[in-house]
Image: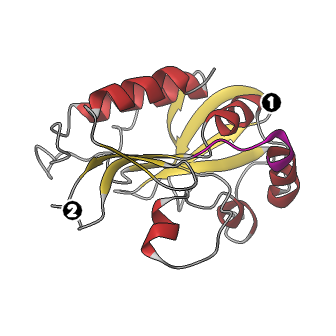
Amino acid sequence: MIAQDLIHTMCADAEGDIRVMENGARLLVHTPHVAPRAYLHSIFPPLSSIEISDLDVSVGEVLSEDYRTLLSESNGLELFSNALSIYGLVTENRRSVDAVLKQPFDIVSPNVDEYPRFAAEGHCIIGSFKTDGSLILTDILTPSIVRVDRDAYEELNRWECLRNFLTSEYRRMSKLFDTKGHRYSTEVPTAPIRVQ
């Protein structure tokens, strides 16, 4: 299990403020101060093993075991008004608000169409931080999660594994928002501080 405990915590923290879309996507904590149909967190329905295998082919990389497990629990996540996004498989290409609300950001595009020319072989971009555009990577050789600068591809942070990354970042970012999704201060960045 990679995200089940985190998903349970997120749902409990939402205190019943959960909207379930027809495809099973769960939108937690309505944040109308951000936008009329905005939510603090999004949890997308899991992928089947066939969809995950097809995603390997689409991305052109073998996805890490931890990331594959995450996809079997949730097809990506959006945390804290998209301050942190974990990508997944886009299954619907409509441009309606509901279509956008019920699916994650696409993992294929950053790994195929936009893949940085200086990226290391075996790295797969699985997410990003909105405030600085930094990328979240997995490496098929290790369970580590790495945050890199989008332009220079320089390592900014590293976590032991995907589960630790998600848990620690949720805990850290929870201190930046109140229970209704208001940021305490826009002066404090939502991306983690770079480890020197």
Image vertical order of residue 178 relative to residue 27, above or below: above
In the rendered image, the residue lying farthest to the front is 22
Residue 145 lies left or right of residue 78; in this view the side is: right
- Residue wearing tag 2: 34
Q: Give the magenta part as a residue range.
A: 45-51
* Residue 40 in sight in this render: yes
Q: What element carries label 2?
A: loop
Q: Quadrant of residue 112?
A: bottom right
Residue 38 lies left or right of residue 90; in this view the side is: left
In the rendered image, the residue lying farthest to the bottom is 95
Q: For the point 68% across and 67% down, which residue is it?
A: 109
Q: For the residues labelled 2 and 1, say whether their Cβ atoms are less than 8 Å apart.
A: no
- Residue wearing tag 1: 141
Q: For the point 39% across and 57% down, which residue is it?
A: 130
Q: What residue type is labelled 2?
A: Val
Q: What element carries label 1?
A: loop
Q: Where is residue 2 in the image (x, y as percent from the top left)?
A: 60, 24
Q: For the point 50% across and 28% down, which residue is it?
A: 165
Between 28 and 134, the one lying in front of the other is: 28
Kindly report which numbered mark, 2 or 1, lies closer to the viewer in this rendering. Answer: 2
Residue 12 lies left or right of residue 26; in this view the side is: left
